[in-house]
Image: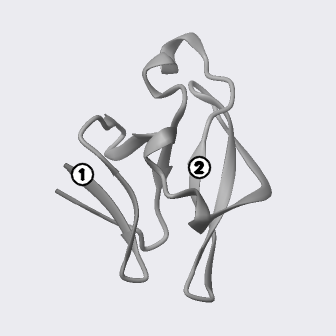
Amino acid sequence: MMKAIWNNKVIAESDDTVVVENNHYFPAESIRKEYFKDSSSHTTCPWKGVASYYTLEVDGQENPDAAWYYPEVSELAKPIKGRVAFWKGVEIVD
């Protein structure tokens, strides 16, 4: 079971992650939505598409744009459709 942890809280947990470019992509239904706020940030990956971001908020602390997902994925990125990945100090453990 893989867990995403930030600020000592489990923010996502799943035994069905997909690893792409050393990032674990968790199913969207496995995130604890109470810790996620929509962000207006977007970036573009040449082969995956346009990423959208979430800001994490745990116990009054924010981690801006620490989670990302692709609302629409390219053909090459189909395995990560409907999944969320993390960075910026989010620890991924099994």
Disc 1 from disc 2: Cα separation: 17 Å
Instruction: Give the quadrant of residue 9.
Output: bottom left
Considering the numbered disc 2 on the image, is that residue within a helix, a strand or a loop? strand
Residue 9 versus residue 59 in the image, above or below? above
Viewer-side label of 1, 2: 1
Quick check: 33 left or right of 1?
right
- Quadrant (top left, top right, bottom left, bottom right) of the C terminus: bottom left
Q: In which quarter of the image is residue 70?
A: top right
Query: Which residue matches tag 1?
Result: 2
Find residue 81 and name its label.
Answer: none
Residue 68 numbered mark, or none: 2
* 10 Å crowding of disc 2: few (<14), some (14-19), many (20+): many
Q: Is residue 46 left or right of residue 87?
A: right
Residue type, mark 2 in image: Trp
The picture places residue 46, in percent across and down from the top left corner, at 62, 29
Q: Residue drawn at (50%, 21%), measured in percent from left and top? A: 77
Relative to 88, 44 lies left or right: right
**First along the sequence among labels 1 and 2:** 1
Judge by depth and name the residue closer to the eye, 27 or 89: 27
Is label 1 in a helix, a strand or a loop? strand
- Compared with 19, 66 (above or below) is below
Which residue ends up furthest to the top in the rendered image?
A: 75
Residue 78 on image: x %, y %: 49, 17
Q: Which residue corresponds to the image point at 41% horizontal and 69% vertical from the top-left?
A: 90
- The amino acid at mark 1 is Met
Q: Which residue is drawn at 36% across and 69% down?
A: 5
